[in-house]
Image: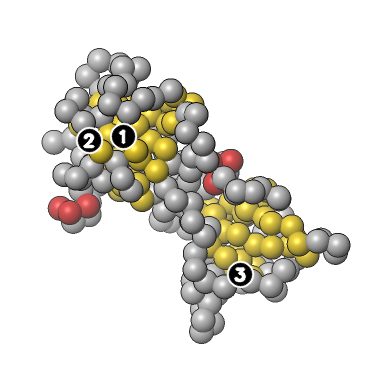
Amino acid sequence: MTALRRAAVAVLLAGAVVTGCGQAEGYRSDGAAPTSASPSPGEELDVDDCVAKDDAPGSAGDYEEVPCTDHRAEATVLAVFQDTAPADPRDCPERTDDTVDVPWDAGSRTVAQLVCVRNRTAPHPGDPGQGGGPHLVVGDCLRVGKEGWVSEVVCRGGSPADRATHQVVEVLVDQRVSDGIPFDGCAAGLTPVVLKKWATTDTGAEVACSRELD
């Protein structure tokens, strides 16, 4: 049985500052691993394998590999990346709902694996507007708070405190941005939200060209 540790894919964007032009700067995600203990090395996972939440005491919400015929099977493996250091969930297919980390015992060494999974049934947080997944895509929604904090949220529903303020119209990648200088690469009428989600360097950033919601 292969134990899987949930990877950090929640789109929680700390330190964003909204400027006078409506631009949000400093959007980032730590990509920090969970504090639960690492699982023991297991077998290699393949595309179309299935996983389920491990409900055993002390599992901290980890996943485990199960047969796809098992009634507990919750998600299907879409892709597996080995030796990704640091692991970048943006490499996952756009249909990805979640990612998990699993070490694989390759004999002479332990290989890190980033595993991209999609739920076998709804909900699918990785779909446009559903508030999750490792990608920010057209149709997703953001909430820009009064203090500049930005998070990805579902486009419809939710409490007033979690209601979307912007919807993404276009995503620009590897953009050069400078502190204090408004970004002017979005079409007229759209608000640029400058993101540094999953960034490992400061050489580029994602920019979500978004329309403000009522």
Residue 202 image offset from top left, x and y in percent? 47, 33
* Crowding at mark 2 (Cα within 10 Å: few <14, some 14-19, many 20+): many
Can residue 118 be seen here?
yes
Residue 140 image offset from top left, x and y in percent? 35, 39
Q: Tell me the amino acid under the disc marked 2.
A: Val
Mark pair 3, 2: CA separation: 37 Å
Contact flag, marks 1 and 2 (Cβ < 8 Å): yes
Residue located 33% across and 48% down the image = 14
* Crowding at mark 3 (Cα within 10 Å: few <14, some 14-19, many 20+): some
Q: Nearer the viewer, mark 1 or mark 3?
A: 1
Residue 107 image offset from top left, x and y in percent? 85, 64
Residue located 50% across and 29% down the image = 203
Say if 165 sits above or below 116 in the image: above
Residue at the extreme bottom of the image, as rendered: 57
Residue designated by label 3: 38
Residue designated by label 1: 25
Image quadrant containing the N terminus: bottom right
Residue located 60% across and 49% down the image = 87
Work out whether mark 1 precedes mark 2 in sequence or the reverse, and give the earlier one.
2
Residue at the extreme right of the image, as rendered: 108
Q: Nearer the viewer, residue 199 or 156?
A: 199
Residue designated by label 2: 18
Q: How many marks?
A: 3
Q: Tell me the amino acid under the disc marked 1.
A: Glu
Mark pair 1, 3: CA separation: 34 Å
* Crowding at mark 1 (Cα within 10 Å: few <14, some 14-19, many 20+): many
Can residue 127 be seen here?
no
Q: Which image quarter: residue 171?
A: top left
